[in-house]
Image: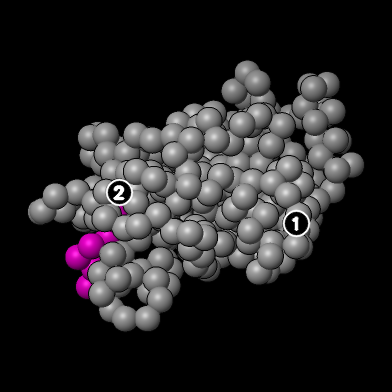
Amino acid sequence: MKLLRVGTAGAERPALLDADGTLRDLSGIVDDVDGALLADDEALDRVRAAAEAGELPALDATGLRVGPPVGRIGKIVCVGLNYHDHARETGAEPPAEPVLFFKAADTVVGPYDTVLVPRGSAKTDWEVELAVVIGRTARYLESAEEALTHVAGYAVAHDVSEREFQIERGGTWDKGKNCETFNPLGPWLVTADEVPDPQALSLRLWVNGELRQDGTTAEQIFPVAEVVRYISQFMTLYPGDVINTGTPAGVALGLPEPKPFLRAGDVVELEIGGLGRQRQELKNA
């Protein structure tokens, strides 16, 4: 299933995109697309049955904002330097263990919402990423196979980053990762049953129509299942939590000087095969 949330920011309603591309209203049978729904197999079965029976009313998508596909996200755990090609382009050694950092849940916006260039920024960068959404509480998972049973689904994430804040201003990466609007998510949450192999997904990103990233999750140093298993050794993952699993080569940081960092007026488009496409225009904060 392709689950999503539509409507004005803060007042989104749950919806489903059916096989014919018609937007369907879920608000009559579930309250939201969030951790509570993703952890409730019976509720998900009701949604699936209603969709298959053609019982869900259609929504007019004209002018309707698409919000983040998951509501009330608890935490966003991110994996840095998780692609062989991205490590090479930045001159970094591939890490021996996953590099973890956090993004605050309030960085999340819809897939077509405006992204704000922070005040004082000279090095705002793009990163297309596969987002993993957790569907079952995960603690001390023992195997990659077990880890995948805790995944509710997948989505497109844009891990917008400010490289000067991240690298040159001291401390951890958090300064460059948590600026407002720095995590567009969606358009859909595609349930795990529709993604048989998360290591066989194409990722692409364009800036002002120029292809900048063209990669595949096959290049991940730590695959999705290992990332989920590994993180569960250090923290509990709850339904509705999100993991951003890293970006392939092609970010501005890895390009020759003068590096084409983002500015107000730029347009970024990104997609992952089968998971949908995003588009954001940048404006000054």
The amino acid type found where label 2 is placed reads: Arg
Q: Front-most of 112 and 218?
A: 218
Q: Tell me the residue that label 2 is attached to.
A: 88
Residue at x-position 34% and y-position 48%:
86
Residue at x-position 48% and y-position 59%:
96
Residue 74 location, quadrant: bottom right
Per the rendering, the mark at residue 81 is none
| Residue 118 on image: x %, y % | 30, 68
Crowd tier of the residue under label 1, counting other residues whose Cα lies within 10 Å: few below 14, some 14–19, many 20 or above = some
Q: Is residue 123 magenta?
A: yes
| Residue 257 on image: x %, y % | 10, 53
Residue at x-position 37% and y-position 81%:
171
The amino acid type found where label 1 is placed reads: Leu
Horizontal side of residue 156 vs 69, given as left or right: left
List the single residue furthest toward the right: 42
Q: Is residue 90 magenta?
A: no
Q: Tell me the residue that label 1 is attached to.
A: 141
List the single residue furthest toward the top: 20
Sequence order check, earlier mark of 2 and 1: 2
List the single residue furthest toward the left: 258
User: Start and end of the magenta stretch?
Assistant: 120-126
